[in-house]
Image (cartoon, grey):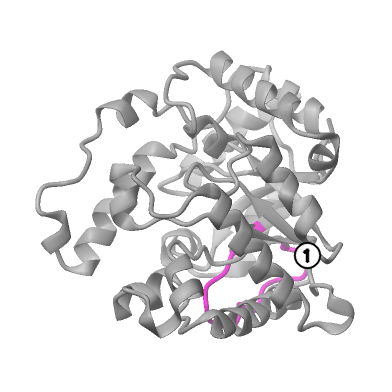
Amino acid sequence: MQHLVNFSTHAIHLDQFERDWERVHAFINRLGLNGIELLIGDDPPPVVPAGLVQGVHLPYWIRWLEIWHAGPDAAVSAEERQFLAGGARDAAHMVAIQRRLWDQAAALRPLYAVFHVSHVTMEECFTRTYAFSSEGVVSATIDLLNATAATFPGGEPPVRLWLENLWWPGLTFTDPELAGQFVQGLRFENWGFVLDTGHLINTCPEVASEDAAIDLVLERLTRLSPQVRARIEGLHLSLSLSGAYQRAAPALPVGFATLPFAERYTLARDHVALIDQHRPFVTPRCREIVSAIRPRVITHELLRLDRHELERNLGIQYCALTGALPTGGSHATL
């Protein structure tokens, strides 16, 4: 079982290491981790030390279904089309962009590449009144993935795809039959699921304690079919207890619709960060989640303002999982 930590090509992470990938590599080695899960952007991936990147997170297309269905006629601004859907013009262009992203991910030689199965507008982040259902998101995602995979030799992606749950419409792991549609609908074999514990907990704002959060995750897992559970190969591990905020948050900031795109995006981003807390688990009961899944990879997806906070939060969660702090040169197994 590998232990990774999430990272990205964004300045908020790179600046913590003086934009030096060798420093990142040294930090990971000192903590005894196996590597990083790297969130890439639309640009070509960076040149990094060999073995550092064990997983890739593909760019998250937050708002894409209007374009998938309506193409140039979609009521999506140019800014939103570029920033929230990869600049795609229509479905065929989306397939071409995904193909390029899969190739770029494969060039880093990771074990997997994560794809978010979701769709949400900035307004819907607040209102939770959605234009598209989870069924619609899942169906379109299956079509997108199948169409992209078909462009590769043998119809198989060049990197193993891991499909991730969120709490927006799409894959949430709250509907066992909907999750099972991927098993039935995908026409290629090089894929699996990655379970994000924080995202799953966010689907139930009534959860108010760490024990209750773990109970919820375990209960949701028991409802999944054996075929779906067998496909859960990765774990994004973090705790989110944002129920009180979710229940108290305003439906929509005053004057939201009239604000410039950048201001609306910042408000939505900050709102989402308050929902998805990325806190470390403290109780050893988090081991029950790992035992129920037996994942190949655990990615410690934790909030941090700097490398010291990352190391502190990682130590808290790692100790809860293993009973000891991560130590350089040894990769702990559970």
In the picture, measured across the screen, residue 239 lies left or right of residue 205, that is right
Q: Is residue 142 above or below residue 212?
A: below
Q: Is residue 38 magenta?
A: yes
- Relative placement, left or right, of 289 versus 45 is right
As rendered, which of 167 and 22 lies closer to the eye?
Answer: 167
Query: Which kind of residue does numbered mark 1 sit on?
Result: Gly
Q: Residue at x 70, y 39 (%)?
A: 177
The total number of labels drawn is: 1
**Residue corresponding to mark 1:** 51
In the image, residue 64 lies at what x, y percent? Answer: 46, 68
Relative to 234, residue 70 above or below: below
Asked if residue 284 shows in the view, the reply is yes
Q: Residue at x 71, y 80 (%)?
A: 103
- Residue at the image position 73 percent from the left and 38 percent from the top: 327
Left or right, 214 with respect to 14, comes to right
Q: Nearer the viewer, residue 330 or 219?
A: 219
Question: Where residue 22 appears, x then y in whole percent?
Answer: 64, 67
Specify start and end residues of the magenta stretch as a single range. Answer: 37-53
Q: Mark 1, residues whose alpha carbon is within 10 Å: few (<14), some, or many (≥20)?
A: few
Position above or below: 150 against 217: below
Instruction: Give the camera-side residue of 180 and 291.
Output: 180
- In the rendering, at what x and y percent does residue 99 appear? 67, 80
Examine the structure image and report whether residue 229 is included in the region drawn in magenta: no
Q: Is residue 192 above or below residue 8?
A: above
Q: Residue at point 33% right, 53% down?
A: 269
Image quarter in which the N terminus is found: top right
Left or right of residue 222: residue 15 = left
